[in-house]
Image: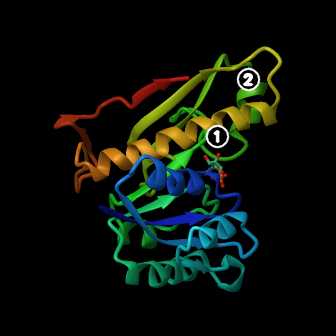
Amino acid sequence: MLNIVVLISGGGSNLQALIDACKTEQLPINIKAVVSNRAAALGLERASKAQLDCAVVDHKKFSSRAVFDQALCDTIDPYQPDFIVLAGFMRMLTPLFINHYACRILNIHPSRLPAYKGLNTHQRVLDDGESKHGASVHVVTEALDDGPVILQSELNVLANETQSTLAQRILQTEHIILPLALRWLAEKRLFIRSNGQVEFDAHLLTEPIQMQF
Ligand code: GAR
């Protein structure tokens, strides 16, 4: 069993996908706790319903990002997680946090990294007239949305697509690739080495594993 702590800020549909996969697909992970930086996050309701430990660390109550990150570490550490999963966690983390859990933080990001780092990815993809879009599960390093990509979804942007339809379709792919990456980690098919390199089935991963939708 892989012990994880999930960090959220909002709806928590990716968290729900993990909760559901544990129940229906025997995903071998143990969600030790869910931590949100927003008390009103819908994801906290999902966590409570699943009887998971929940905590709120409200970033507005801290004087700096570093002090907030220390409070996050203090909240997470008692759970002794193997991995931290950022599932729609919308705060930038400082090196203090990232180094504390070096090579043990995964993020789900709504683009085919390294394309479209940052925010508003769906609208930017539409504005640029891209024909393809997707989502990425990657290892978190100090630079934003920049760590090694493990697994990526890819789908065709439709002719009549809006920001909202695209976001919805991408989210559905996220609900597949995030549990899958965690399954591979839990089943020891995927390893993140201490130098940040990713190995899949004993092969160094130089390109992300792609899933077409
Ligand atoms: C997801 O689309 C996730 O990829 C994105 O926020 C959404 C959260 O949805 N994350 C980021 O943009 C991180 N930079 P959810 O709360 O329903 O899981």
> At x 66% / y 70%, what residue is drawn?
44
For mark 1, give the secondary structure.
helix
Disc 1 within 8 angstroms of ligand 1 (CB): yes
Residue 113 position (above or below residue 119): above
**How many neighbours does mark 2 have within 10 angstroms: few (below 14), some (14-19), or many (20 or more)?**
few
What residue is shown with label 2? 128
Residue 22 position (above or below residue 169): below
Residue 22, horizontal then vertical, whole percent: 45, 55
Q: Identify which residue, 113 or 50, lies in the foreground.
A: 50
Residue 102, horizontal then vertical, whole percent: 33, 63
What residue is shown with label 1? 171
Q: Identify which residue, 148 or 176, lies in the foreground.
A: 176
For mark 2, give the secondary structure.
loop
Give the quarter of the figure containing the C terminus: top right
Three-letter amino acid code at the position of disc 1: Leu
Residue 143 position (above or below residue 53): above
Q: Are marks 2 and 1 in contact (CB under 8 Å)?
A: no
> At x 38% / y 42%, what residue is drawn?
148
